[in-house]
Image (tube, grey):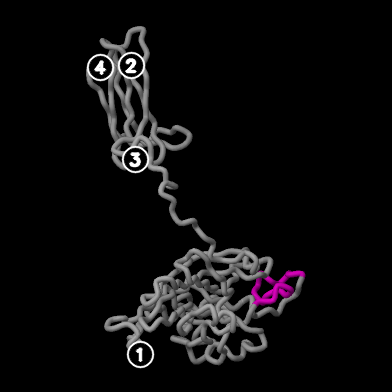
Amino acid sequence: MEFSTDGPDGQDLDLFVFESDASGALGDFVGSSAGFSADERVSIVGAQGYYLVVAFYFAVNNAGYDGRAEFFRRKLIPSDIDDPPGIQDSLASDPGLGYRSHSEPHIAQSPTNPNLLVAGSKEYNRDPDSLAEYDFKIGTQVSFDRGRTWTDLGQLNVCPREQAPPETYPLGNTCYPEDDPNLGGNEPEDADDPRGQGDFGEDYTTSDVWVDFDDEGNAYAMVLDDPGFASGNGWGMSFHRWETPSRQDIRRGRTWSNRIPINAYETPEEQASTLDDKNTFAVNNAGRDRDGKTGIMVACWGQNFDLVESAR
């Protein structure tokens, strides 16, 4: 960015530039130009935000000046991004499924089929207070044409609540109980819910998805896994596999596998006293593709112990 003045010969105008805000408050000094002229210039490399520009009449007699602020070291007329035309953006999630918001996405492309992509993100429950209460599970999407069109698969590995009751947590449940929009949850904020309480599916959270492929064409998803312990802790790590994703799999309802625990704890009390977070994983795809061998997988995350004890 360059600020400049242009005035008549024989006049002396000085130019000073300061950082500022939208109200014009005086901030840190940035630069100045104070020669024996009315033509002054101050250049700022990497300019951003607001600036206060002061033109000081050092020796000016019955004269004015013209001022300019303009970009430099760039095209005066930016290229038309539609010529040549690019690829139109596409919506991966389907609003018609009723999930209230999406966030913290991750995406991966198959190394054996560049047309195939899988993605995942938080999908806030259909429950009307899911945004306010931060209730969500991970949902996934898939594209078979390099991201031009997408299929939203909904929340990952959810099942009717009776298939994953609380007494099976954290090691016995193979899926995640879906929420019931007609019933309130069991958290303190649900105490006055006019729909009543009892929806443990609302309280069960999966989060922080990470997706990847092996060189056999199989897709994987890793998630934080929290059955909703009262402490607010208890994030375990769970995994899902989708063998050679295809459109036929979607039609048949055979996409992601049941929950595969990577890390959980023997009792709800033990898991509730820890906090595991910030997960990722990688697949060793060295060697020939489609040789019938899946490389070693490594998953890692932050693991904090004795949160209950340290809080005392």
Relative height, residue 86 to residue 290 (above, below): above
- Mark closer to the chain start, 4 or 1: 4
Tell me what residue is drawn at x 75 percent, y 75 percent: 196
**Residue position for label 1:** 292
Q: Classify residue 231 by image quadrant.
A: bottom right
Identify residue type, mark 1: Gly
- Mark closer to the chain start, 3 or 4: 4
Q: How far is mark 3 from mark 4, CA to CA? A: 25 Å
Q: How far is mark 3 from mark 2, CA to CA? A: 25 Å
Q: Position of residue 262 (x, y in %)?
A: 44, 86
Q: Is residue 20 visible?
A: yes
Nearer mark to the viewer, of 2 and 1: 1
Q: Position of residue 37 (x, y in %)?
A: 25, 17
Stretch in magenta: 179-194
Tell me what residue is drawn at x 49 percent, y 57 percent: 89
Question: Which sits in the foreground, 4 or 293?
Answer: 293
| Residue 70 numbered mark, or none | none
Identify residue type, mark 4: Ser
Q: Are marks 4 and 2 in contact (CB under 8 Å)?
A: no
**Residue position for label 4:** 37
Q: How far is mark 4 from mark 2, CA to CA? A: 11 Å
Q: Position of residue 163 (x, y in %)?
A: 64, 89
**Residue position for label 2:** 57
Nearer mark to the viewer, of 4 and 1: 1
Which type of secondary structure does the marked residue at label 4 adopt?
loop
Q: How far is mark 2 from mark 1, CA to CA? A: 79 Å
